[in-house]
Image (cartoon, rainbow, N blue to C red):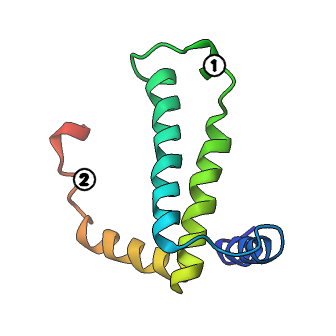
Amino acid sequence: MTIKQAQITIDNWINTIGVRYFSELTNMAILTEEVGEVARIMARKYGEQSFKESDKKEDLGDELADVLFVLMCIANQTGVDLTEALEKNLKKKSKRDKTRHAQNEKLK
């Protein structure tokens, strides 16, 4: 599935199963909540925090998909084509960071 197809699929889902989009502000709050759930898993799986019994069933892939879903909702309702935005962003980064990371002593 392409990014464009995913945005269309999510829009169709929202308008049928989801009834309608939440407000942009509500979706921003939901996105923050979902990113927090990813952070919780990362802190326990890759960081120093230990898992609680209730944390052990959490699925990082599912939580990342929740972030992507809400991000695409926000893009849809604000008229952002994420394919175009990502392509533009990668061009910007490629030009700006052409030698920056290669010259970073911390990365060697």
Tell me if mark 2 has few (under 14), some (14-19) or many (20+) residues whose alpha carbon lies within 10 angstroms of its own. Answer: few
Instruction: Report whether 93 appears left or right of 61.
Output: left
Q: CA distance from mark 1 to mark 2?
A: 39 Å
User: Could you tell me which residue is drawn at 59 percent across and 79 percent down?
Assistant: 76
In which quadrant is the C terminus drawn? top left
Q: Evaluate whether residue 16 shows in this view.
A: yes
Question: Looking at the rendering, in which quadrant would you find the N terminus?
Answer: bottom right
Mark 1 vs 2: CB contact within 8 A? no
Which picture quadrant has residue 71?
Answer: bottom right
**Marking on residue 68:** none
Q: Residue at x 20, y 58 (%)?
A: 100
- Near-viewer residue (87 or 78): 78
Residue type (three-letter) at the residue carrying disc 1 = Ser
Residue 91 position in % (x across, y down): 38, 77
- Mark 1 lies on residue: 54
Read off the residue under disc 2.
101
Residue 80 can be seen in this image = no
Q: Secondary structure at mark 2?
A: loop
Instruction: Tell me if mark 1 has few (under 14), some (14-19) or many (20+) residues whose alpha carbon lies within 10 angstroms of its own.
Output: few
